Image (tube, helix red, strand yellow):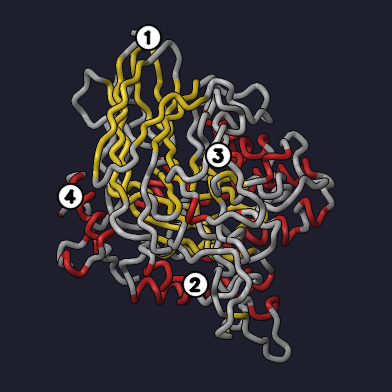
Amino acid sequence: MTEQRLPAWADQSVPPAALDAQGVSRRALLRRAGLFGAAFALGPAAVPAAAADRRHGGHDPRLAYLVGDHHIHSVYSHDAKYTFSQLAAAGAKYGLDWMVFTEHSNFGHAQYGAALEHEEILKARAENPRQLIFQGLEWYVPAAEHCTVFAAPGPHEVDLLTWFESAYDGKLLGYTDGSAGGADTARNEAHAVQAIQWLAEQRRSGYVDDVLVLANHPLRLGIDSPHELRNWRDAAPEIMIGMEGAPGAQGAALPGRRAATSIRGEYENKPSAQSWAGYPAGAYLTYGGFDWATATVGGLWDAMLSEGRLFSVTTNSDAHRIVFDTFKNGDWQPGEDFDNTGKLPDPVDTASPQPGSDFWPGQFSRTHVGVTRYGYGAVMAGLRAGRVWLDHGHLLDGLDVRLKRDCDFGTGVTLGGRLRVRKGERLTLNVTVTTASRPNPQGILPELAHVDVVRGAVRGPAADRDTWKAPDTKVVRTEDVSGRKGTYTLRIPLTAGDSSFYLRLRGSDGNRHGAGYLGASVDPHGPIPHQPGDGDPWADTWFYSNPVFVDVVGV
């Protein structure tokens, strides 16, 4: 593979005049973090501090954030439309540093499509080494819905995906709840756990350098039960690292685009016979475009975090069919179909708008991953470490979070990290925000209205593995930042009590909010559902961050 090159915004040989406003802003963030020059270069990811270090405090490295999308479909998926080149070009246009192509499992994909797409990916890596392009798979999980699976580039990346697909994909095996009628789910659930353990073994053995798994749109159908999510995580927490906090298909409810019943994310389903019975009716909607599991303060995501274990959230395009697009699928040649080619015909421009729910990669949804180096390994290491925040509508240019003991002079810990403190210690949460420096792709200059601090107690492993509530979690502080511009830091004082806890952040443009799903005493101004068919995503944008954990110990 051709040697990688730094992205233009990080390459000092590229003059500032050649960058747009956001590129200049990102370069300034890199400089402010002290990572310009040799500190932020090509090479392996930084090695984290040893887990055996039991000193009080914490010292995480300074980070640059790479923007990406881990859920994208091309003509190598049976239900998508665009060529690999069209999607890669769109990602570059909208400022993505990394992309994961996650084609649907299918016999045609396993036999033909995966290898054909790999040839395109190798060519793209050579022609544009500034862009990090991963090859992945959207796994039909036995007894559940879908997950992103992707590996680090290497000689076995395609073989890993196709072997995994053939041996563990619920669709190919007939193990999905939909095709098996919900029967024998104990067998299917066990097979999903075995699949994740198999991936972990391929990493341990060195067959691939790295591999990661993330659950996709977990509450769209309600068939990913809380105990399944916990079982997947526990099977290999270094592999199964999290879930989509917000699904793709964010344009599904643009007024007049689809149907009067459309919901952002295509969350238009009611419980079925395969849905987990413990989810309430409100779980099948999105809130500010985010999945109920993530958007509910004190809900399922918080219930998992309250065990004291990292479980990350992301967002992405899930690009299949773009809103306002004019392309349609091309026509098959006689005798051809997806099963015997592994690839759809290239799309044809009709010059007339076609049905669609999605945005281009990077156009609306962005996952930001903190790294100290530029490269594939660095992105995967940053995701595994939980150094992640996400935004919609290009709401922010930058976010840096540091939690420190007041008696320390070090850097403290950042997203995904752990701070070790004594009972009663005083702490400061430093939240550095860089506001949007240019209009987003919709022509709107986003403005952040508030930043919310969510705090939850850590109680250890859940006795009930199907619990979806964290009763000790709530919004503990809201900072009104309306009208603030440029880069500024919020300094939020905290005190460590007797018990360990975690903190996470959230904020929005302030256009649409109300009492959260579990009530105003828990979340006084959280995201709320939109009316069916009237969910303009550009008018209701949010950011979320991963947590920081605080381990409270005796003197």
Q: Residue at point 65% right, 57% down?
A: 533
As drawn, the residue found furthest toward the bottom would be 334
SS of the residue under disc 1: loop
As shown in the figure, which amino acid type bears the numbered disc 2? Answer: His
Q: Do the residues labelled 3 and 4 touch (CB within 8 Å)?
A: no
SS of the residue under disc 3: helix
Residue that mark 1 sits on: 554
Q: Which of pointers 3 and 1 lies earlier in the amino acid sequence? A: 3
Q: Is residue 505 above or below residue 100?
A: above
Question: How far is mark 3 from mark 1, CA to CA?
Answer: 34 Å
Q: Which of pointers 3 and 2 lies earlier in the amino acid sequence? A: 2
Residue that mark 3 sits on: 295
As shown in the figure, which amino acid type bears the numbered disc 1? Answer: Gly
Q: Residue 31 carries which label?
A: 4
Question: Looking at the image, can residue 395 be seen?
Answer: yes
Question: How far is mark 1 from mark 2, CA to CA?
Answer: 53 Å
Question: How far is mark 3 from mark 4, CA to CA?
Answer: 33 Å
Q: Identify the image quadrant of the N terminus.
A: bottom left
Q: Residue 430 vs residue 82: left or right?
A: left
Residue 353 in picture, x, y percent from top left: 58, 77
Tell which of 525 and 378 is nearer to you.
525
Q: Are marks 4 and 2 in contact (CB under 8 Å)?
A: no
Q: Which of pointers 3 and 4 lies earlier in the amino acid sequence? A: 4
Residue 424 in picture, x, y percent from top left: 35, 10
Q: Which of pointers 1 and 4 lies earlier in the amino acid sequence? A: 4
Q: Which mark is residue 118?
A: 2
Question: How far is mark 1 from mark 4, CA to CA?
Answer: 39 Å
Q: Are marks 1 and 2 in contact (CB under 8 Å)?
A: no
As shown in the figure, which amino acid type bears the numbered disc 3? Answer: Ala
Q: Identify the image quadrant of the C terminus.
A: top left
Q: Is residue 76 above or below residue 141?
A: below
Q: Residue 470 vs residue 189: left or right?
A: left
